[in-house]
Image (cartoon, rainbow, N blue to C red):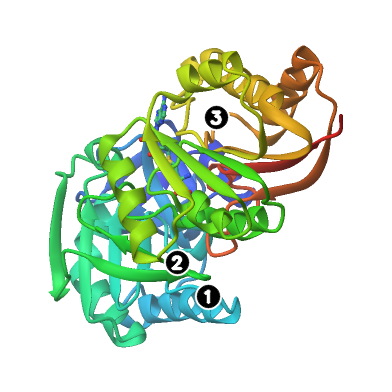
Amino acid sequence: MLPTAIVSARGEARLRQGHPWIYRADVADTAAEPGDIVDVIGPRQRFLGRALFSDQSQITLRLLTREDEEVDAAFWRRRIDAAVRYRAQLEIDATAYRLVHGEADLIPSLIVDRYASVLVVQALSQAIDRALPELVPLLVEITGATGVLARNDPRVRLLEGLEQRVEVLSGEVPERIVVREGPIEYHVDTRHGQKTGLFLDQRENREAAARYARGRVLDAFSYDGAFALRLARHADRAEAVDSSAEAVRRVAENARLNAIENVAPREANVFDELRELERSGARYDTIVLDPPAFAKNKASIPKALAGYKDINLRALRLLNPGGVLITCSCSYNVDEATFAATIYEASVDSHVPVTVVEKRMQGRDHPVLLGVPETYYLKCLILRRLI
Ligand code: SAH
């Protein structure tokens, strides 16, 4: 007998709709320990599936399967195999990409990113944290990885009552790993870099942006300069702006690694910098706006929208006619329609007519699970200034 969780009628209805999460309010009773895998039982004693149980998070249950199947090594292997095989089908022209994207690979709360021969994992729930000793050897066997690092320092782990720690779980993980994305190589510090090292979710948007890049390029919120480096090959000059001195240092380092000489990184606050550039009469042919999530929660949405509008309005004014703006939002709390409406406002207020050339999202290695809006967070619009 597995431990059990009995859900309310509302919980059962939610599972029927296809959402894998059951919140605490919809769980009537549990007989389980933190991090157990439980049988999910409906209000009329019906078996609904098996789930990851958390005694701390508001998300009490994360559904693993609707079948009466054992969640054993063979189960995990099937799920990991499927995720890995899907990435192989994508024929990704890079050595760094996401292998397992949690809910969207039916392994809720597990993230696995590949950086050359190293895997970086994040266990974002009690049960996945507990399952890591079982999952890591499978990951190594399936991918042939030479090292596995746990980047278990995201703040969401605190909601699970899990500590934040970074540790090597298998093999060796060098301090610095060189990966390739298309024609560009990067030094990655998987222990200290943002996210798991790189913003892998933007890989395909960088590829897309490169198709429009020309003239003078501004990469605003550049981090380690991934857009700037990629676009510089098609441009006269690419300026990368980030408020982090460490990021600026890394842009310069990556430019050297690739022998790219027309990338100029500088440390500045983008909000101030855009104003300053406007005052000085600067003009660009290609601008990328890839800010951090301005809306971390619902309460900050109005302020976030004001921020998105401000930077987009100023970027549009800085563009030459015919110039292209690649504008992104990774705020899950700002949906696609709201983001598009904000860009429209920026266009109206700046008196800059634009056409939408492409509507994009996070890369295909970070797929969206339909019916689970939480898995759709990155929006990317490519706009062209008409006159
Ligand atoms: N474009 C990058 C990812 C950017 S992440 C890529 O493709 O890899 C967001 C970046 O914005 C972070 O590096 C952070 O340091 C920077 N940042 C946050 N607030 C900022 C501000 N007000 N001005 C400039 N940079 C900022």
Report the front residue among 294 and 123. Answer: 294
Residue receiving disc 3: 333
Residue receiving disc 2: 97
Query: Cβ(mark 1) to ligand 1 < 8 Å?
Result: no
Q: Is residue 3 visible?
A: no
| SS assignment at label 1 | helix
Which mark is drawn over residue 87?
A: 1
Task: Judge left or right: residue 155 versus residue 93.
Answer: left
Q: Position of residue 163 (x, y in %)?
A: 14, 44
Q: Dot 3: few (<14), some (14–19), or many (≥20) neighbours within 10 Å?
A: many
The residue depicted at 65 percent of the width and 52 percent of the height is: 209
Report the front residue among 154 and 54. Answer: 154
Q: Amino acid at mark 2?
A: Tyr
Disc 1 to disc 2: CB gap under 8 Å: yes
Callout in the foreground (1, 2)? 2
Ligand 1 in which quarter: top left
> Which of the two discs, 3 and 1, labels the residue nearer the N terminus?
1
| SS assignment at label 3 | loop
Q: Dot 2: few (<14), some (14–19), or many (≥20) neighbours within 10 Å?
A: many
Against 100, residue 139 (above or below) is: below
Question: Which quadrant holds the N terminus?
Answer: bottom left
* Residue 148: quadrant of the picture: bottom left
Q: Amino acid at mark 3?
A: Asn
Q: Amino acid at mark 1?
A: Arg
The residue depicted at 49 percent of the width and 44 percent of the height is: 43
Q: CA–CA distance between discs 1 and 2?
A: 9 Å
Disc 2 to disc 3: CB gap under 8 Å: no
Task: Judge left or right: residue 33 versus residue 304.
Answer: left
